[in-house]
Image (cartoon, rainbow, N blue to C red):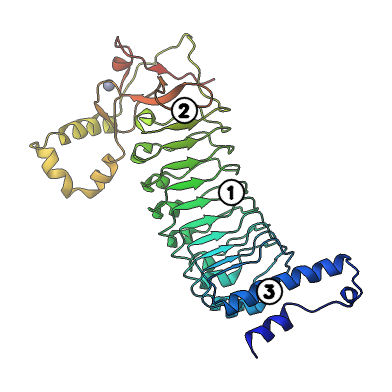
Amino acid sequence: MSPLEATSTSCASQPASCRHGNLNASARRWFLQKKMAESVVRALYGRGTSLTLASKKIKEVPKCVSRLTNLSVLLLNNNSISALPAELLSLQHLAELNLGNNALKEVPAVLGHLESLKKLYLFSNQITVVPPEVIGGLQNLVVLNLNHNQIQRLPPEIKSLSRLQRLSVLDNKLEEVPVELGHLTSLSEINLTSNHLSWLPQQLYQCKELTKLYVARNKLTSLPEGIGTLAKLQVLDVAGNKLSMFPVEFHLLPLKEVYCEGNRFVRCEPMASVQDAEVLSLKELVARFVLREDRNRSSLVHRMLPHYPFLTDLLANGSRCALCLGPFLTTWLECVHFIRLKDVKVRSSLTIPVRALLCSYKCFNADGHSYYGVAKR
Ligand SMILES: [Zn+2]
């Protein structure tokens, strides 16, 4: 069978109504099918690498498309496709596939065999499930767009997408994101806007190429500590969450745009407070001593610590006082300072509360600083 026969038998057949010149609904459908067949035939004969079947009211992808083995771009958006034929796995040169605005209920299994895919658009379908075996087969993906679906979770196998630069899961039902997201070290843009996220994994900060992070309209009560590692972050959108303050050293990021309206930030207002006498535990006292000694490269403690990996791991959780820079491990005073963001485009407030930790009341009661205690209501 020639390619032309293949398309004319499986893609288009003329309904009787058309023979009478009656332009009713079925005639219009026939017209669209004819256009679609012409596109496929053109691609077959022209040895084209791009095929556009967008907005053609397609319910099933014609199997003859699988004969276009040189295809690198396939646009199937704005149709009514609910499944993909397994035959499409012959498209081993396909780099871009647009299935946006269709009727898919899950990410089609055949996609897991299209290893050449670099850009995959699945926005505006009814997808609830992202199967691990499919996502695990897309190692070359650079752009993944899953916007406007009903996805509740992303599988840990997402860590296979080591070349992914842009991940967009806007307007879904995600309740958490997998810690494996931290393996995607090529990511420069993540959009998790309008989901149900109440927390973000600290591993997200391993994505050090990140320049844009959108997590607006979720249920976040805090951002994980350690955000300073995102040294390239330029745009952050956390609007419409439940944040009370930003994490420690947030104001040192090279941000150009911050969107943070609609949160529950602490406000600066005077109120009386009682300071309970602080009694540090023996563990805390020893930890502070060891952490301080460890800063001195010639000290015995600094030289001996590598021989005690358990202790090293434990002390790795230590931090330092924002005022005296002295170390501490498990006991600190939660404080806040109000930072006026300069050279940053901000939609609402220019002054933001940033978390700061102090080692003791001695530091807190010292003169000449702008750290405030945080009142719990
Ligand atoms: Zn201190």
Alpha carbons under labels 2 and 3: distance apart: 50 Å
Quadrant of the frame with the N terminus: bottom right
Residue at point 29%, 15% (across, down): 362
Can the viewer see residue 85?
A: no
Can the viewer see residue 91?
A: yes
Task: Check disc 3 and report the residue beneath it.
Answer: 38
Tag shown at residue 345:
2
Locate residue 237 relative to residue 187 in the image: left or right.
right
Residue at point 59%, 37% (across, down): 217
Residue type at tag 3: Glu
Image coordinates for residue 346, horizontal then vertical, percent: 49, 26
Image coordinates for residue 220, horizontal then vertical, percent: 54, 36
Element marked by disc 1:
loop
Q: Quick one: label 3 or label 1, which is nearer the N terminus?
A: 3
Locate residue 231 relative to residue 272 in the image: left or right.
left
Locate residue 275 relative to residue 11 in the image: left or right.
left
